[in-house]
């Protein structure tokens, strides 16, 4: 397939049937969103920016400003540059050197906040972004956390999946801005209203009622604020993994399935594998793997880093502990949410 530009290269990512340890277990299909040019958020950047140009909210040549420390930054930088816009990214010291290199190569303007705000790094970035909007009249802010085009971007992902697998019984998906979980769940429920949605978060993230820990090591999932795009009513069950467990699961994913990914994918993999042995052998599980491993070569994949962080034992329980919702957890645990309003 010939693409006229990099925007057209977004989407149509591989769907891989994962190896199973038991013939009597359900089947896991991994959607490799990491195979987009920069990662899963490329879909979001494409959807939001093209729609903003269509409606006139983004004027020709106007600058684009977004808050991100990961793949959304790269997606916005790529799509914006392709369409002739200057892109400004507000980030924080947690940004990895590889992402910084990518953004610099794309000609992106990068602003790094130096101190946490009232609600961690996330709020500090948003405060700085608001200041920059006043300094750059006419600038467009994609607002990934609340823009309805964030979840809408995943309609295309679901269309790709259902072309190959007519019926999905379970969705296992990480949660950060809420776009992929909310958008994929809504779209899949059009085909199967009984779809079970398993959300994957990290300990120290506030999205599902846990206390905030801005020092958490995981990137790509979790949040210090609850984005309005997170539709809690769609979620049947939520899992939390701590840093050591997420790192262990990510290394397992590389070793067992030969997929070099980040910790969002690793955590989703751990939960999907656990679920696989609890469901019917006829059940189809869709697991979304959003992130490649290149951002994590000096953290997850670096033993010296893991030793320094005192997590090199790489303990990952065989199964999580079930707890009542709002129980503060420190290790892999899960709560059932179905039938309740759990919005924070």
Image: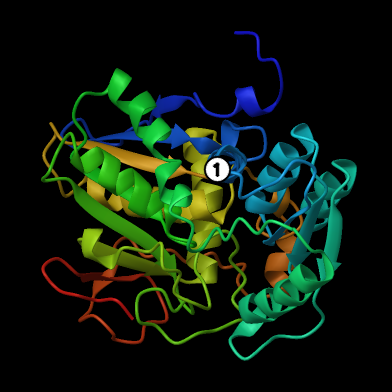
Query: Which residue lies under the disc numbered 1?
Result: 55
Q: Is residue 18 left or right of residue 313?
A: left
Q: Is residue 169 above or below residue 121?
A: above
Residue 171 in sight from this viewpoint = no
**Residue 191 position in % (x across, y down):** 17, 34
Q: Is residue 100 left or right of residue 144?
A: right
Residue drawn 57% across the image and 37% down it: 54
Quarter of the image for residue 75 reads top right
In this view of the protein, which residue sits in the foreground, 118 or 50? 50
Assign the N terminus to one quadrant of the image: top right
**Residue 162 position in % (x across, y down):** 28, 25
Q: Is residue 99 above or below residue 323?
A: above
**Residue 260 position in % (x across, y down):** 60, 39
Residue drawn 74% across the image and 34% down it: 83
Quarter of the image for residue 131 reads bottom right
- Local SS, label 1: helix
Residue drawn 58% across the image and 66% down it: 218
Residue drawn 14% across the image and 73% down it: 340
Single out the residue that lies furthest toward the top: 1
Q: Is residue 339 left or right of residue 296?
A: left
């Amino acid at each position: 397939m010939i693409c006229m530009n990099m925007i057209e290269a977004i989407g149509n990512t591989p769907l891989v049937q994962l190896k199973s340890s038991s013939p009597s277990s359900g089947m896991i299909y991994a959607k490799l969103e990491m195979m987009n040019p920069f990662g899963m958020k490329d879909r979001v950047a494409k959807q939001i920016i093209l729609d903003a140009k269509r409606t006139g909210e983004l004027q020709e040549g106007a600058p684009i400003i977004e808050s991100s420390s990961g793949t959304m930054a790269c997606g916005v930088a790529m799509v914006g540059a392709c369409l002739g816009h200057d892109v400004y990214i507000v980030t924080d010291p947690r940004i990895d050197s590889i992402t910084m290199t990518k953004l610099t190569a794309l000609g992106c303007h990068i602003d790094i906040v130096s101190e946490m705000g009232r609600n961690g790094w996330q709020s500090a970035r948003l405060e700085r972004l608001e200041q920059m909007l006043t300094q750059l009249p006419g600038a467009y802010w994609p607002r990934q956390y609340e823009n309805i085009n964030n979840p809408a971007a995943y309609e295309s992902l679901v269309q790709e999946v259902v072309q190959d697998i007519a019926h999905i019984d379970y969705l296992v998906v990480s949660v950060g801005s809420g776009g992929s979980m909310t958008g994929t769940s809504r779209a899949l429920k059009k085909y199967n209203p009984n779809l079970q949605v398993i959300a994957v978060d990290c300990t120290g993230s506030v999205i599902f009622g846990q206390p905030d820990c801005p020092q958490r090591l995981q990137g790509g999932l979790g949040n210090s604020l609850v984005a309005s795009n997170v539709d809690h009513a769609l979620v049947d069950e939520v899992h939390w993994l701590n840093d050591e467990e997420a790192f262990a699961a990510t290394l397992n994913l590389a070793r067992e399935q030969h997929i070099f990914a980040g910790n969002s994918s690793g955590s989703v993999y751990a939960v999907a594998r656990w679920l696989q042995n609890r469901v019917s052998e006829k059940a189809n599980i869709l697991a979304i793997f959003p992130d490649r491993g290149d951002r994590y070569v000096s953290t997850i994949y670096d033993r010296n880093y893991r030793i320094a962080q005192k997590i090199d034992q790489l303990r990952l329980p065989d199964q999580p502990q079930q707890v009542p919702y709002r129980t503060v957890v420190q290790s892999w645990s899960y709560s059932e949410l179905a039938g309740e309003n759990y919005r924070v």
